[in-house]
Image (cartoon, grey):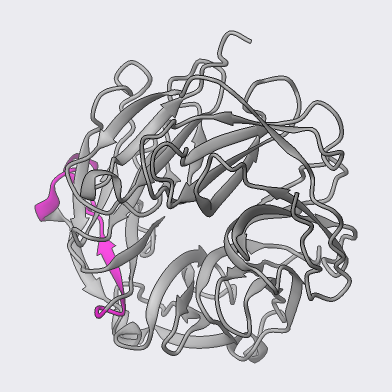
Amino acid sequence: MRVPLSCAATTVLLIACISVSVRAESPWECHIIDDSSRGADGVKLADVNRDGLMDITTGWEESGLTSVYLNPGPAKAKEKWPSVTTGRTRSVEDAAFVDLDRDGAVDVVSCCEGSTQSVFVQWAPKSRDDYLRESKWRTEVIPISKDMTRWMFCVPMQVDQQLGVDLVAGSKEPNAQIGWFEAPEDARNLMAYRWHTIGPAGWIMSLKSVDMDADGDLDILTSDRKGPMRGCRWLENPGAGEAQKKSWPNHFIGCRDREVMFLTVADIDEDGLQDVLVTANFQKGSEIVILRRLDTRGKSWKSYVIPYPDQTGTAKAVLVADIDRDGRKDIVFSCENAKAPKSGLMWMSHTKGVFEGDWQAHDISGPKGIKYDRMELLDVDEDGDLDILACEERENGKGLGLFWYENPHKGK
């Protein structure tokens, strides 16, 4: 077993690796939502048509388009979902739901890297009956974003408590940064949006709006993959006023010596404090790092490492939930570079304490799929357990597309 080095972060100590064993189990059943395009790159959820069912948006990077999928309900969820192409933008890396102009129709914001280097708004048709008609959607670029940097992710957030919702965004080199687009009085006037840089970056992998210091406003939690700012950290919201348009105080919480990927927030040890879990690549191995919060102000953390099993690829994304319905928090993780016979998607359970080293890994995807991405947990078939929504980019040169894995634990 490898013993990891310490994370170079204030008030963070890294203890010994937590051991993992692998149980031989059959993969879960996979249901394809859409495999008609190439390069499905992450999933985001929202109930856009207000029918009580969570819908999906995703960007297809290699095909250069963004799509929305309307959840058809449990009776038809195993079939292809009704969908619409909301915009055609090259090198789309991320798509997010937001009703930007507050007209009741949920729009989509797409972040593009590559040579496109722009943030686009795809305006939804006002009539609900037109939502699945591509001709009724309109795509516009936010002018100030154009050619600034390679945009990676965007999070809708009311930053300044003024006018409409703002957009927090992060990017990767060149000119990598984290900041926010200040919304004008007329949200449709994209020329009027103003950009405010709040911190430098290298390669942003995660952006989450979270009140990290329990002061009543939302801060920005991020994982940064490359460069001098790499690791997990949060940017402290300085409060309303001009200070929000300048650099926000930065607080590292761990993993400065690792190539971190996607993170998630969860109270995994159920002590009443929200912890952070992140996947990371370190030397020749991959890991899940549990950054255990020790105080309410977000200044004191302790790190624990769970190594990826040998049967998997390299680190990509992580989520926390009770997968087998035994009352304990489990971990779901995804991989890149998971060429057969390796698995690209697994979950881990434990029978003792979270930090006691008895985690067991269980297969989800089997050898199918090479490059999985970020996931969402949702009871798609409404049978009482959480299924996994995910996408994959590389299998057979095209990718498996967008799909969900059916959790087999419904009878438990």
In the image, taking residue 11 as reference, residue 333 lies left or right, namely: left
Furthest-front residue in view? 1
Residue 18 point in image, percent of width and height: 79, 45
Residue 20 in the image: above or below residue 176: above
> Which quarter of the image is occupied by the C terminus?
top right
Left or right: 177 with respect to 23? Answer: left
The residue located at (63%, 81%) in the rendering is 229
Quarter of the image holding residue 157?
Answer: bottom right
Foreground pick, 167 / 41: 41
Of all residues shown, which one is farthest toward the top?
411
Instruction: Give coordinates of residue 25: x percent, y percent.
Output: 54, 20
Q: Is residue 218 visible?
A: yes
Say whether residue 127 is visible: no
53 relative to 303, above or below? above
The residue closer to the viewer here, 262 or 73, is 262
Q: Which residues are magenta?
A: 115-135
